[in-house]
Image (cartoon, rainbow, N blue to C red):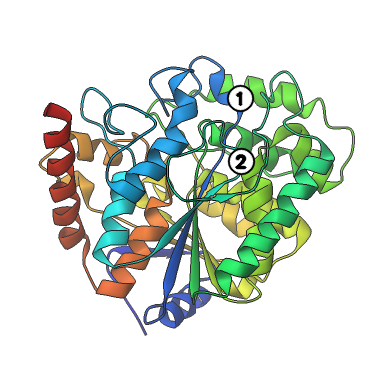
Amino acid sequence: MIFLEDFELFGNTAQAQNFLESVKSGRFLFSFVMSYTQTCEIPGITIAGADSDSMQYTPPADAEYLHYGHCKTIDGIPMTPDGKPTPGILTKTALESASIPHLTINAGSKITPQLPFIETGLSFGKNISVEPAMSDSQVSTAVEFGRIVGRNMASLTDCLVIGESIPAGTTTALAVLQAFGFDAKVSSSIPTNPTKLKNEIVDSALKRIDSDHPYSVLAKVGDPMIAFVAGMLSSASSISKVMLAGGTQMTAVLAFASKIGFNEENTAIGTTSYITNDQNANFTNLVKEIADVPAISVNPGLHNSKYSGLKAFSEGYAKEGVGAGGCIISSMLKTGNTSSKFLNLVEQEYDRLSTMSTS
């Protein structure tokens, strides 16, 4: 059996071992799903962008960075002025070091990226603190489109890895989880999780629910990414292994997918230890409550980095995003790299970005 000291297994550990064993010598394909919720425009809710106007550029900027190594829709690179990079730096390093191909899907991003991508035509989600995120029919469309894309992508690979970028996605995820009856505590892109603000938004959104139909619930309090990725999971998991790459948002995907059906035996969540160790969240317990699928966590070793910008991930900034955890797990399985080798590769990419930002 496979054993890698950088991984930690939660939930159904026997299934986790089987999952890792079955995919380690197979083909991986990463699908990067861009989306948007106007909930991110509420002041103080997220740091996924310098301000509410720039947040809409975060998903396409991440997509362009993965594709080109630099951005086109924004000037510069996806890094804060004090040197904290997008979690996409972890994803890009993982994918390139293992030669894992990826495709970008626009499932409701406000801004389209300047690169080849799959267009769904889905609208972005509305601000759930003041109005429903979507109509029931928009949820239905998103699920069906997700099923079509998931079926096609799963037929090309042995393990479909699905990641996302949606600013304020942890807030809509919290609303969806609570609406489905889970006592969720979710992570944040900032060390001081604005839980009071999130709970106020969620409470006002939950009052709007007037039906227990899953599509109606998601329409009132969710976002298009959850509907679309759950659709992908439902069809893809009947064909190949599927790793949901992410933290809080992927538990919401799992909760909704459990209402519309998917193959648990072919499914796992892959994330970073920064999510599973987050004291403000209850990620691993949530996964266990929602479905009988394993969670696999990887420690990328960034606490050992010589760069404070990379160390910040281990100190609570971002923690996860752009499918980072699942892509690192896939990369390590394919290459046999350890976290120390991975850290070395990430630092090389960080050097390259830092040189770009000063030139």
Residue 321 x/y as whole percent: 42, 44
Residue 320 shows up from this direction: no
Q: How many marks?
A: 2
Horizontally, is 246 left or right of 61 in the view?
right
Residue 190 shows up from this direction: yes
For discs 1 and 2, the disc positioned in front in the rendered view: 1
Residue 289 x/y as whole percent: 64, 56
User: Of helix, strand and loop, which one carries label 2?
Assistant: loop
Label 1, label 2: how far apart the Cα atoms are: 22 Å
Q: Residues within 10 Å of mark 1 (few under 14, many from 20)?
A: many
Q: Residues within 10 Å of mark 2 (few under 14, many from 20)?
A: many
Residue 270 to residue 98: above or below: above
Q: Nearer the viewer, residue 249 or 200?
A: 249
Residue marked by disc 2: 184
Residue 238 x/y as whole percent: 66, 75
Q: Residue at x 30, y 47 (%)?
A: 68
Residue 355 to residue 232: above or below: above
Tell me the quadrant of the picture where the N terminus can be found.
bottom left
Residue 27 x/y as whole percent: 42, 76
* Residue farthest along the right direction in this orientation: 211
Residue 11 to residue 138: above or below: below
Residue marked by disc 1: 38
User: Which amino acid, by three-letter code, is at mark 1?
Assistant: Gln
Residue 198 to residue 248: above or below: above
Horizontally, is 341 left or right of 164 in the view?
left
**Which of the 4 image quarters holds residue 344?**
bottom left
**First reached walking from the N terminus: tag 1 or tag 2:** 1
Q: Residue at x 50, y 40 (%)?
A: 281
Q: Residue at x 45, y 82 (%)?
A: 22
